[in-house]
Image (tube, rainbow, N blue to C red):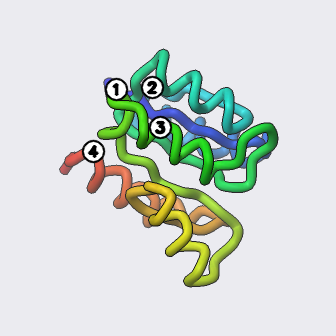
Amino acid sequence: MRKILLVEDNEMNRDMLSRRLMRKGYEVIIAVDGQEGVEAAKHELPDLILMDLSLPVLDGWDATRQLKAWPQTKHIPIIALTAHAMASDRETALAAGCDDFDTKPVEWSRLLEKLQHHLKEE
């Protein structure tokens, strides 16, 4: 079973995404802020991380930079999730080390394609 870390502070988004991911057969680990996300990633070593960028304690950009700097987690694909949809937001997320970018509200079929692409699934 592929393991996905969902780092999301909004309870409604967390609930919706985690239920959909579990229905697709993924194991879901949840973190509610960037620092918790970094710790969960280092402990659980997920196959992929969905990272909200506007997070309390440690924002998603800094959490991503930390994970990409750590040898054991730098290979894990990180997909940024954000309500900020400007081109500069995408560039900033990719510059921080995110492997992909998606906007909120989440369009499930598009996000699922990105997950499958980064997990190299059919």
Q: Residue at x 33, y 30 (%)?
A: 71
- Residue mark closest to the camera, 4 vs 2: 4
Q: Which mark is residue 27?
A: 2
- Residue 18, relative to residue 40: is it above or below? below
Task: Say which element carries label 1.
Answer: loop
Amino acid type, mark 3: Leu
Dot 4 corresponds to which residue?
A: 119
Sequence-wise first label, 4 or 2: 2
Q: Residue 1: name its quadrant.
A: top left
**Cα distance, mark 4 to mark 2?**
13 Å
Residue 23 shown left or right of residue 122 in the figure: right
Where residue 17 sits: x, y (%)? 60, 44
Q: Residue 87: name its quadrant.
A: bottom right
**Cα distance, mark 1 to mark 2?**
20 Å
Sequence-wise first label, 1 or 2: 2
Sequence-wise first label, 4 or 1: 1
Q: Residue at x 46, y 59 (%)?
A: 111
Is disc 3 in contact with disc 1, using a CB cutoff of under 8 Å?
A: no
